[in-house]
Image: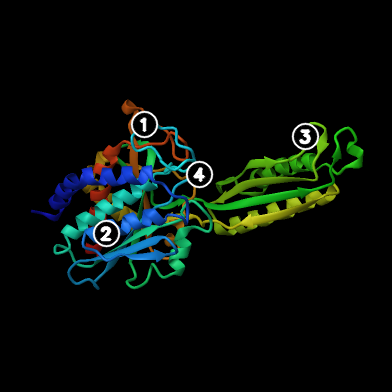
Amino acid sequence: MLLFDQIKKLATEYAAETIVSRRYLHANPELSYKEFNTAKFIAEKLRNFGLHPVEGVATTGVVVVIEGKNPTKKTVALRADIDALPIQETNEVEYKSKNPGVMHACGHDVHTASLLGTAKILCQLKDHFEGTIKLIFQPGEEKNPGGASLMIKEGVLQNPSPSSILGQHVMPLIPAGKVGFREGMYMASSDEIYLTVIGKGGHGAAPELTVDPVVIAAHIIVALQQIISRKASPKQPTVLTFGKIIANGATNIIPDEVKIAGTFRALNEQWREEGLQKIKTMAEGMATSMGATCQVKISRGYPYLENNPALTKRIRKSAEEYLGKENVVDLDLTLGSEDFAYYSHQIPASFYRLGTRNEAKGITSYVHTPSFDIDEEALQVGPGLMAWLALKELMEI
């Protein structure tokens, strides 16, 4: 039986087990860098496959290698993220989250279960391929500084060193059964902006005796948008959004300070640095001009994510072989961010999307929402596809 046919057969055979794993993970989500039980579950599964996982990488990460014949010939890495989000789930399903306020609302349960399915397929085929597949189950994708950066510091891209790395992520805008690819620039950098405007509080009826940080904060928020509209090139996609403002006064109380939090996204590292400096300079300068001060804290997040063109072209072709050309679609550029980007700055990398949408079943919610769910038909596709992409990459000279 051809390798292609073996993968298809095993993917179908193991699909039910993959769905069971996904439902267990969905019902038992854990937040970033606290995925202790998730990591134990992953390691136990891998040991049951006959593998020898390394646990505790970057606290809760798990890494394992699957060696074929001539294992030193070439190594390809596959990555799944394992953390959940601080969201209260509203879905009424049998696998609903058991942990109040914590939910797999970004599909990391799908990524993890899918990669476990890939691992089981590859274990059955290790006498049929040359080289090594390194599986990376990564913590903390949802929280700075990003688990990918920590795993890289702890040597996940060494011993053995992969020639390339692939990442798979759910996409609720694409129907289940389809996958999406994009060559080159794909996702934005992401930095968190924290501003504290400090004035002088007092009675709302006597504003002349105060330095009103609420009014000053309002001016700063509006003015900072000029950095996007007048300082960034119109040819350079960029976003500055403030989503949190805390002014702890009252109808007749002007507070001493206002706290503001937001995000800055860019697709160019030089502009990223310039933009962040302009935000700091403008916020501080405007506060000073109005008699207040502004403390600016920037939490550095992920860099932009670039899909290696040659690698992405190859795996897209392999996906078309596996699924049919009609089931492979183009992805648009996005200002979303992903810490998989760190890998893309180290070795050739490609981050593709697994369709999970099914309008007939009412499965249409976007990621990071309390009603997010997937059509589990996607798990008939994900594990086998990733196994096929990895083995085709091992064959690439």
Residue to which mark 4 is pinned? 86
In the depicted structure, whether residue 149 falls above or below residue 176: below
Q: Amino acid at mark 4?
A: Pro
Q: Amino acid at mark 3?
A: Ala
Name which residue lies at 31% across and 59% down.
43
Crowd tier of the residue under label 1, counting other residues whose Cα lies within 10 Å: few below 14, some 14–19, many 20 or above: some
Distance of mark 1 from mark 3, alpha carbons?
A: 42 Å
In the depicted structure, whether residue 342 falls above or below residue 336: below
Mark 1 or mark 3, earlier in chain:
3
Distance of mark 2 from mark 4, alpha carbons?
A: 28 Å
Q: Amino acid at mark 2?
A: Leu
Residue to which mark 3 is pinned? 250
Name which residue lies at 41% across and 41% down.
98
- Horizontal side of 193 relative to 132 (left or right) equals right
Q: Amino acid at mark 1?
A: Ile
Q: Please tell me whether mark 4 sits on a helix, a strand or a loop.
A: loop
Question: Cβ–Cβ below 8 Å for labels 2 and 4?
Answer: no
Mark 4 or mark 1, earlier in chain:
4
Q: Please tell me whether mark 3 sits on a helix, a strand or a loop.
A: loop
Crowd tier of the residue under label 4, counting other residues whose Cα lies within 10 Å: few below 14, some 14–19, many 20 or above: some
- Horizontal side of 228 relative to 352 (left or right) equals right
- Horizontal side of 55 relative to 204 (left or right) equals left
Residue 224 versus residue 106: which sits nearer the camera?
106
Give the x, y percent position of residue 166: 34, 56
Question: Cβ–Cβ below 8 Å for labels 4 and 1?
Answer: no
Give the x, y percent position of residue 321: 21, 48
Residue to which mark 2 is pinned? 46
Residue to which mark 1 is pinned? 363
